[in-house]
Image (cartoon, rainbow, N blue to C red):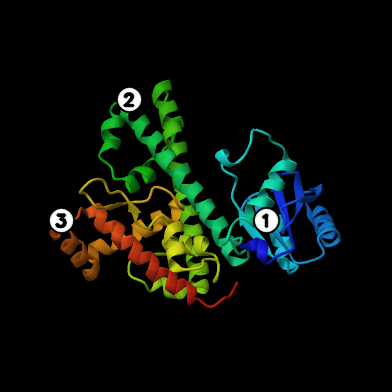
Amino acid sequence: MLADELDYVVGVDPHRDRHALAIVYAGTGAALFEAQVAARERGYVHALGLAEREAPGRRVWAIEGTGSYGAGLARFLTARGERVLEVGRVRRERRSHAKSDALDALRAARSALGEAKLASPRAAGEREALRALMVARAGALAAKAAGLCQLRALLVTCPEPLRSELRSLTRARLLHRLGAVRPDRHRDAELRGTLIALRALARRVQVLTAEEHELKREIHALVARLAPALLDEPGVGPVAAAQLLISWSHRGRFRSEAAFARLAAAAPIPASSGRVHRNRLDPGGDRQLNRALHTIIVSRRKNHPATISYIERKTREGKSVREAIRCLKRYLARSLYRTLEATPQTA
């Protein structure tokens, strides 16, 4: 366990403006020191100085939320050769009703002591740039979908003969037609107001579409530089490959391909009862990573002979399509993990 390898654990409960620190002696779990530092560069320097003074031996930092408020501190410490681990929030049943930042930092440190294997924070650099691009693209797609829904709702109630004229158009022709309308030519208040709204929504969707395409080009370029072998896999597009890279992060983050499959919610979950012996799909894990695996399998089901024959064979054996897909996800997680682990470390 971690307690056998270290002298001290520095637990951190990060927040937007201040971080709470608690230093624990690894041998006994006793609290030795508590402090709060500012959540900025000067505060990070102060935190490292406190750790060097109060925990001068072998130490590790156990930080909650290394992908959120703790990201800045985790990067600062990693750049200076400190060992940083990511700890999750303590489950409700494992903590009392007492709550404070200092207690949360203390719990973070002590929770690390009892674990045999802990996660390391995700890598920054180009992979963090990839995550930012994916977040922006997801926002653009959500806003575009909302705009299209509003556009369709307005088309249902818009006045005739405009409704009959527009309802038969394809999406591309509809957006082009509405983006070029001139509402000022109409004196009827209802028609003029409806056309102004339709034009605004159409132009919004067009702008968001162009934005999404630009972001996808940047994602493709980054993925091609970081892991070109992923794009050579059947059914793996730039968006799915980007999610795989973000979740995997860097070589050595996962102890085995089974741990990666568990994160991807592709590990078999027993669901047996009585004489029925079966496994089911896992509802937990990284849902975006699981979605990427599902997207790849959906693509392979259309034109990948090995995937098509595998699903047909499993259904002939009495398994459902969902069970066959679960098996495929587990295989795919193993295969893609090996591809990722063989990726050269460029960032």
- Name the residue located 57 percent from the left edge and 61 percent from the top edge: 116
Residue 266 lies, in percent from the top left, at 38, 58
**Does residue 98 appear to the left or right of 122 in the view shown?**
right
- At mark 2, the secondary structure is loop
Q: Is residue 236 visible?
A: no
Residue at horizontal 55 percent and vertical 66 percent from the top? 253
Residue 209: x percent and y percent?
Answer: 44, 51
Q: CA distance from mark 1 to mark 2?
A: 62 Å
Give the left or right position of residue 78, taking residue 131 as reference. Answer: right
Q: Secondary structure at mark 1?
A: strand
In the rendered structure, are the residues bearing label 2 and label 3 in contact, judged by CB atoms less than 8 Å apart? no
Which residue is labeled 2 in the image? Answer: 159
Circle 3 sits on which residue?
A: 318
* Circle nearer the viewer, 2 or 3: 3
Viewer-proximal residue among 317 and 177: 317
Query: x, y (%) of residue 212?
Result: 47, 54
Q: How many marks?
A: 3
Say whether residue 289 is left or right of residue 153.
right
Quarter occupied by the N terminus: bottom right
State the residue position of label 1.
62
Q: Are marks 1 and 2 in contact (CB under 8 Å)?
A: no
Image quadrant assignment for residue 324 = bottom left
Q: Whole-Å distance between the Cαs marked 2 and 3? A: 54 Å
**Amino acid under disc 3:** Gly
Q: CA distance from mark 3 to mark 1?
A: 47 Å
Do callouts 3 and 1 mark residues in contact (Cβ within 8 Å)? no
Badge 2 local density, few (<14 within 10 Å), some, or many (20+)? few
Residue type marked 1 = Ala
Residue 228 in picture, x, y percent from top left? 46, 74
Judge from the rendering whether residue 74 lies leftward or rightward of residue 57; answer left or right. Answer: left
Closer-to-camera residue (183/146)? 146
